[in-house]
Amino acid sequence: MPDSPSRTTATPRLARRLHGIPPTIFTQMSALAARTGAVNLGQGFPDVDGPPSVIAQAVEALRTGHNQYAPGPGVPALRQAVARHQQRHYGLELDPDTEVVVTTGCTEAIAAALLGLVDPGDEVIVLEPYYDSYTAMIQMAGGVRRPVTLRAPDFRLDPEELRAAVGPRTRFVLLNSPHNPTGTVLTRAELQAVADVATTHDLVVITDEVYEHLTFDAAHVPIATLPGMRERTLTLSSAGKSYSFTGWKVGWASGPAELVDALLAAKQWLTFTSGSPLQPAVAHALDEEPDFPRALAADLRGRRDLLCAGLADAGLRVRVPEGTYFATTDISALGWRDGLEFCHALPERAGVVAIPEQVFHDDQEAGRHLVRWAFCKDPDVLTEGVRRLVAADLTR
């Protein structure tokens, strides 16, 4: 009888599959901020919590016995609230019993979607720069990523590049709009280009719309609303960004029952279920606090403008984003080898932390000198960060 794999021989198999993925840059840079006392404009979490009424609902749920396992697909009240949300905002009709599943944040929704749908060798088209979990989960599923680059300075989708990325083993498009980290909100024409590719080549679209309500200069259009796309689109989102409860980790997926079932088949082996007392509270948020995301977006617009003006005053070339929490600068004129070198030096040089975008690229030249800054912070924090940047010498 052959020996069972030892811990030391089993572990490298996963390590090899994840080869090339750096440790999370957010953890590194946040630790650097804490160690140096720098203003953290790196990691994207807000300084202020969401609606008090939603917190009160979570407290009430804790007190009234909602503390055991929730159903695997999520509590009915939240699945129904998600279905109402999609109908109210986008005209998408969903069966909450078969076409909605609750996840532990959008990050688990991404993981479960890719693990549940992607077979080894399947190709996945992904917009780069990309949210870092996309790379890890495509590789863990045994898939092959095919990046399509949103290029500086405008970060728009090139339909020709998109069409050229399709090969005989392409099965999926992993979309992200509003796009992290560039802040691009894909136009209807850009989305139609994706839809045309998907319908022509019979591809499934997995779309991360976690910033769906946080747009400033452009309207978010879910790709599932385009002709022929509802039946081939799995839509992912969460309450974390729209309602400023990033630590609650309550998200959801919606779409055709067969795609939701595939995601749920993987999710049951990940977290099985998600925070029971938080789910009724998020249902309350979606149904009873529908104006909060709009007010949050208006507030974030002011913070965006404050940060972007300050980055320009500090001599950085900044692209003003159309959505999300983030602005991107090009630091190539400052003389640094790349954004990673710049960001590691920045806490000592200026007392500020930012994130190098090259770690979100396969195309290192496209991302080499791009740096991401978060503006979802208290205005006083942004003002202090800007003051430090303007006062510092940012050249190498």
Image (cartoon, grey):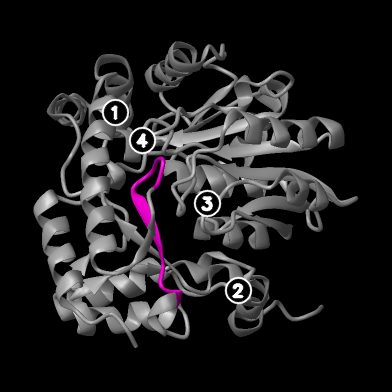
First-in-chain label (3 vs 2) = 3
**Disc 2: CA contacts within 10 A as few (<14), some (14-19) or many (>=20):** few
Q: Amino acid at mark 1?
A: Pro
Q: Which residues are magenta?
A: 321-332
**Disc 4: CA contacts within 10 A as few (<14), some (14-19) or many (>=20):** many
Q: Amino acid at mark 4?
A: Leu
> How many numbered discs sit on the rendered protein?
4
Front residue of this view, candidates 65 and 351: 351
Instruction: Estimate the x, y position of residue 43 in percent, counting from the top left.
Output: 31, 60
Instruction: Estimate the x, y position of residue 83 in percent, counting from the top left.
Output: 48, 16
Cα gap from disc 4 to disc 3, whole angstroms: 19 Å
Q: Is residue 104 magenta?
A: no
- In the drawing, does residue 355 fall left or right of residue 185? left
Q: Residue at x 52, y 29 (%)?
A: 101
First-in-chain label (4 vs 3) = 3
- In the drawing, does residue 327 fall left or right of residue 79? left
Q: Amino acid at mark 2?
A: Glu
- Against 278, residue 267 (above or below) is below
Instruction: Estimate the x, y position of residue 369 in percent, counting from the top left.
Output: 47, 73
Work out which residue is located at the far right of the displayed protein and give it.
Answer: 168
- Label 4 belongs to which residue? 214
- Label 1 belongs to which residue? 293
- Label 2 belongs to which residue? 365
Secondary structure category for the residue under label 2: helix
- Label 3 belongs to which residue? 154
Q: Is residue 328 magenta?
A: yes
